[in-house]
Amino acid sequence: MRAAPTILHLDMDAFYASAEQAAKPSLRGKPVVVGGLGPRGVVATASYEARRFGIHSAMPMAQARRLAPNAAYLVPRFTLYRTVSDQVMGLLGQLSPLVEPLSLDEAFVDLEAGGVADDAASAREIGERLRTAIRAVTGLTGSVGLAGSKMIAKIASEEAKPDGLVLIEPGTERELLAPMSVRILPGVGPATGDHLRRAGMTTVRDLADAGEAELVRLLGKAHGSSLHLMALGYDDRPVVAERDAKSVSVEDTFDVDLHDRVRVRSEVERLADRCVRRLRAAERSGRTVVLKVRRYDFSTLTRSETLRGPTDDPTVIREAAARLLEAVDTTGGVRLLGVGVTGLADYTQEDLFAQAADALSAAMDAEVTEEAGAEQGPAEGAEEAAEETPEQLAERRWPSGHDVRHETHGHGWVQGSGVGRVTVRFEEPGDPPGRVRTFRIDDPELQPAEPLPLVKDPADYSSWPANRPKSRSGDGSSGGESRP
């Protein structure tokens, strides 16, 4: 625990939804829900306007649609979110060498280690300047919590939402925590919370009064002791600069259960390729391939295979995942598939002769396929592809909310698609709401596009916080707050 509130916690406000509102002028101030749009999709983020209807993260999308049928429902654009996250993390990295990202939109910063704050006044100033910088560079808002520990700083940022700053003075932690629910403490999830409730403990004060011995009896030595310390306001966890990823994985939930074994294998191979792309983007390799299968009855199976050494070879990972699938009974249908890689390393260790053999085999297979195609006509499966409905094609190529570019009308985003048509609103970040036009889904002038920057001419914060530039969008401050 520190004597000064020099641990900062930043949490971007409704990050995905706010980014979409900034990118799409016609959605500003309106309810926006981001997530999977299929029958089994869930909400990833809801804007504050949508939350007024009771919509929240992890809610089934079908339920969200019933609560707010007129909200804008969009498919996530992770390329945009990662770009904005990189900008925010870059600003944090200039404050301190100790930045601990928790997700794309959330991080701890040790201000003392960066030499930018050593008391409440300097910490507050840095927190306000950070909020100003984030708004000037990304166009978005973030909430800041300042305290003498990570646990209290995170609680402070939650209290600051949206677009605010709360500083909690060291020494006041126990009084602050006492009336709060036990679920506010790290490590207290639904199961532990229910266990404590049955023992008559619903507030943090109850935990503190119960004593360490009682919590150890209920939860075990390690968990009980740490929970008792946190209930008293103690948290000495340091800000860790490197949170090394333990695994890389991808998964898909299907709108309709998959019964065709060939289709299931095809989806597993596609997921393996996506997993490899993430692995390579992180400049990592992995030794253990993991397959996850959730069946029609919600039972979930995982299977794994450990390779001779770390790899990022798509053929190796694809074939390992396919072998794992052979050991799984998919009778009755599959609702979810996932492929992951664990045992990550910064290098690749492969049998060069095996790689060469794979390359040669692939080349020979390509030649054989080409010759067979010339003699026999369309390959197996071509007829199925030809039967894809206009709705399926539109959903696959024109996801709601994604970027497009038209040769005549310029940049826009997909408002919706179906019945062989796609509706596009043409507008860019910073512009007034744009016009809406409808096209055939196979219009040759309409193509998918990359997201545009949310701020066209961001302020230069390359030398901050030593030199404070003039913000181009106001100071973005809604005033800080201290909690005694």
Image: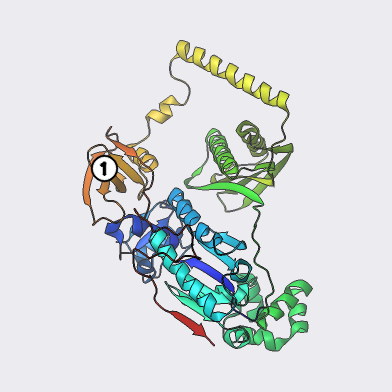
Rendering quarter of residue 244:
bottom right
Which residue is outermost to the front? 467
Q: Is residue 318 above or below residue 366?
A: below
Residue at the image point whose x is 69% and y is 89% from the top: 209
Q: Is residue 441 above or below residue 66?
A: above
Question: How far from the left and from the top, in percent, is residue 292?
Answer: 62, 47
Q: Residues within 10 Å of mark 1 (few under 14, many from 20)?
A: few
Relative placement, left or right, of 481 versus 325 is: left
Q: Is residue 62 visible?
A: no
Check the image and tell me how it is coloured. rainbow
430 or 399, which is in the foreground?
430
Give the total number of marks visible in the rendering. 1
Question: How far from the left and from the top, in percent, is residue 285?
Answer: 66, 41
Residue at the image point whose x is 56% and y is 46% from the top: 250
Image quarter (top left, top right, bottom left or bottom right) of the N terminus? bottom right
Residue at the image point whose x is 69% and y is 77% from the top: 227
Q: Is residue 345 above or below residue 128?
A: above
Q: In the rendered structure, which amino acid carries the disc numbered 1?
A: Gly
Query: Mark 1 highlights which residue?
Result: 410
Image quarter (top left, top right, bottom left or bottom right) of the C terminus? bottom right
Rendering quarter of residue 96:
bottom right
- Element at label 1: strand
Q: Is residue 166 above or below residue 398?
A: below
Which residue is outermost to the top? 375
Question: How far from the left and from the top, in percent, is residue 67?
Answer: 36, 66
Q: Is residue 229 visible?
A: yes
Rendering quarter of residue 84:
bottom left
Residue at the image point whose x is 32% and y is 61% from the top: 71
447 or 367, which is in the foreground?
447
Question: How far from the left and from the top, in percent, is residue 395?
Answer: 37, 43
